[in-house]
Image (spheres, helix red, strand yellow):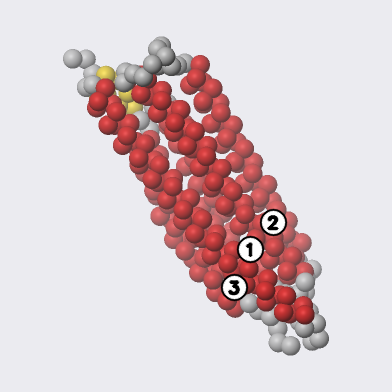
Amino acid sequence: MKSITFPSLAALLCAYLFCGFAYAQQSSTSGQIISVEASQVATVKNAQEASNLIKGWTDKTRAGIQNMIAQEGAVSKEIEASYARMLKTCEIALALKDNAPRFDTSKASIYEKQFQNRIIKLEATRADLNSKIQASLTKINTSQPPNCGLFSTDAIPCQVFKYKKDMLSFLGESIGSYYEIVIKRYKVYLGIVEKSKEHCVRPDFLNKLSLSDEEHLVAYETKSSQVFGRLINSISSAFINQAAP
């Protein structure tokens, strides 16, 4: 039986990592724009002008974050599909045990630890961001403008209050979605490591996977967490003042 190299998986994974790198460059720039748009301190003439301004802030921030999550999801689906094909190929290889390839699996535990550590760090980052959101929401709730909770009002302080609560809640949901996708990708990596222990994946493939991930995606994950952090701070401190008539 010939050695199993899984060229389709390697090709798709390389394409995935390249696209991930290009997307990281684009999205980190978009994230900075989102952050600037959300760093709101503005002066308006009336409540309607404030409403229009808040809608602009909201729409741009939501669109940017949703686009980031959608592209991350598309990338992950690509690698999950490749992994599913690899599993089927491994089943065939294990069924034909005679002359099955025997690879050096001594370094598999190194890659396993590396990917496990990435998951631990991502979970810690997610928890830290969620804590910041909860702290901001608590602070906002304790400083609620008078009468905003009693009836519908378009007073500027009430509009800003509602904007902060709505957008921080949206960020909390978005952070959950983003990190769920990224952590799932690392769990796929761990699955690949397990298959390498069964002599289904060449050691050099694991090495390329590790290097590509470190080179192209880890830095982007850090930038994404920074974007979320800046958004939390900027939305929490948003302020609209009404100009004197």
Counting from the top left corner in percent of width and height, residue 99 is at: 79, 86
Q: What is the distance, in whole Å, between disc 1 and disc 3 at their CAs?
A: 15 Å
Residue appearing at x 57%, y 47% in the figure: 179
| Figure quadrant of residue 2 | bottom right
Q: Which residue is mark 1?
A: 210
Assess whether mark 3 and mark 2 are in contact (beta carbons under 8 angstroms). Answer: no
Residue appearing at x 57%, y 52% in the figure: 181
Residue 9 bears which disc, if any?
Answer: 3
Q: Residue type at mark 2?
A: Gln
Q: Residue type at mark 3?
A: Leu
Relative to 44, residue 111 above or below:
below
Looking at the picture, tell me which residue is in the foreground, 233 or 135. Answer: 135
Q: Nearer the viewer, mark 1 or mark 3?
A: 3
Left or right? Give the position of 167 relative to 118.
left
Residue 86 bears which disc, if any?
Answer: none
Q: Which residue is mark 2?
A: 114
Counting from the top left corner in percent of width and height, residue 13 is at: 56, 68
Whether residue 238 is visible, yes or no, is yes
Q: Residue type at mark 1?
A: Ser
Q: Closer to the N terminus: mark 1 or mark 2?
A: 2
Left or right? Give the position of 212 relative to 99.
left
- Badge 1 crowding class, 10 Å Cα cut-off, few under 14, some 14 to 19, many 20 or more, is some
Q: Quadrant of the N terminus?
A: bottom right
